[in-house]
Structure formats: structure tokens, C-alpha cells
Amino acid sequence: MKRVLFATLAILIIMAAAVSLAGVIETKHNFTSVTYSPNAFFYGTRQVCVFCHTTHNGDQSIGALWNHENNPPLYQTYNSSTIDMTISQPHDGSLVCLTCHDGTIAVNSLNNLPGPEGAGNYGTPGGSGLDAGGKLTSSSHAYVGTDLTDDHPVGVTYDASKDPTGFVSKTGNGQLYPDKLLDDGLYVECSSCHNPHDDTYTNFLIESNENSNLCTRCHTK
């Protein structure tokens, strides 16, 4: 029975990985492809996942099996007299995105480089969205920078009691909105609205924002 359970678990893990990979391949996060990521790609490697993940010796301080160099918090955060929730430096749900999108670290600045055997040698950067060192340029549509004052706030400790007429109250159930959108069940981060593995709804949104439906998961206005 134990062997059957372990075999079933292994199959489910492989299937989940395959679905995630299939979702990434046909998006701009496939940095091995000139076709899908014409403005930011790398010659020579065919390992799609390696730009974020490694199977061994991943950086557990920021995310499971994380393979990318990351910054300490160094961002100018959103500020407004109309927001009463606490805003701090971004947490992991944003840092995993900002490690590339803030333009200070090369997209190919990895902890473990792709192995050459059967995978192609590690490539050099190409495309108009990257500079010669592999960093996103400020002219790239994907560039966010370190000044987050003009973007939707992240690093927010979600507390609807600070503005009960403007925000949906938490339920205490991580399977329900707005709780399911929050990083660690607490914070509004990039991951609250974006899924880097799936571009079904464009801009890597986690669900459709038709009629502002995604916005109103948290906002009541």
C-alpha cells in the first residue's frame, strides 16, 4: 500500500510540474525562446525553468527551489494620505518578481547554471528588452525599477478594518477571497494578482479582470 501511495504521489508531482512547464513555454517568461520572448531571451540553453528554479540547493530564504539572485529590500514604497493600511518593504510574493523586473539584477544571474549535457550551453542575452549584461532595460515594458511609488502598492499588511467601507473583510479561510490572494495570508504582493506560470488572462493575471472582477476581490469601490 505504501508503495502505491508513494508512486501515486510521484505521478501527481510530475503531472503538476508538467502542467506548470506547459503553461510557461508559450509565454514571455520562456527566456529560451526567440519566438515567445523576442525581447528578452538567451542563446544556447533549452532549460525553461532554470531562470527561476533549481532542483538542488535552492535558496529557501525567498521561495521553494529558488535559483535566482535576489536583492535585499531597497525599494521606494507607495505612499498616500488615503491609505491607512501599513506598507513596508516587499515580501517574498513580490521579491521573486522584482529580482528581474526591478532591472538591477540580470535575468540570467543564477545560483546554479544550466548544465550543458543534453541541454545546450548557457546562453548570452538577446532581444531589445535586455542590456548586454542581461538586465531588463528601463525602456522595456517589463521594467518596474526600484521606485514603486507609481505602482499598485505591495508590501501591504491587508487589514480591512482600517477602511471597512473601501475593502472586503478577511474571512480567515485561505480558500476564500480576499484571503486566498494574500501572500502568507497577510500581505498584498505581486503574487496577489499575477501568476508567472500562466498568461491565460494576459499580463499573467491570476484570473480575468473583466468588469474589474479581480480588483473587487479586495476593493468595494
Image (cartoon, rainbow, N blue to C red):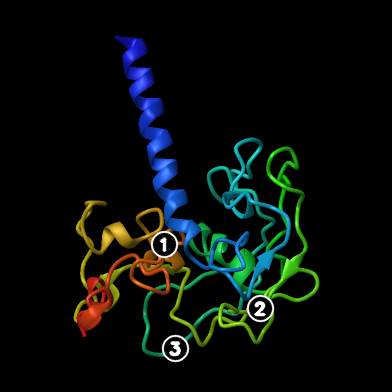
Which one is earlier in the sequence, the residue at label 2 or at label 1?
2
Q: Is residue 198 above or below residue 116?
A: below
Q: Residue 2's image quarter?
A: top left
Circle 2 or circle 1, nearest the eye: 2
In the rendered image, the quadrant that contains the C terminus is bottom left
Q: At which x and y percent is residue 32? A: 63, 59
- Relative to 128, 153 lies left or right: left
Residue at the disc numbered 2: 129
Residue 77 versus residue 200: which sits nearer the camera?
Answer: 200
Whether residue 182 is visible here, answered yes or no, is: yes
Q: Residue 84's image quarter?
A: bottom left
Q: At which x and y percent is residue 219? A: 25, 78
- Relative to 214, 191 lies left or right: right
Q: Residues within 10 Å of mark 1 (few under 14, many from 20)?
A: some
Are discs 2 and 1 less than 8 Å apart at CB?
no
Residue type (three-letter) at the residue carrying disc 3: Ser
Residue at the disc numbered 1: 195
Residue 129 versus residue 151: which sits nearer the camera?
Answer: 129
Q: Residue at x 55, y 81 (%)?
A: 148
In the rendered image, the quadrant that contains the N terminus is top left
Callout 2: helix, strand or loop?
Answer: loop
Residue at the disc numbered 3: 80
Q: At which x and y percent is residue 54? A: 62, 43
Residue 35 versus residue 137: which sits nearer the camera?
Answer: 35
Residue 20 versus residue 67: which sits nearer the camera?
Answer: 20
- Relative to 136, 124 lies left or right: right
Q: Residue furthest top?
A: 1
Distance CA(mark 3)–CA(mark 1):
27 Å
Residue 177: give its label. none
Callout 1: helix, strand or loop?
Answer: loop
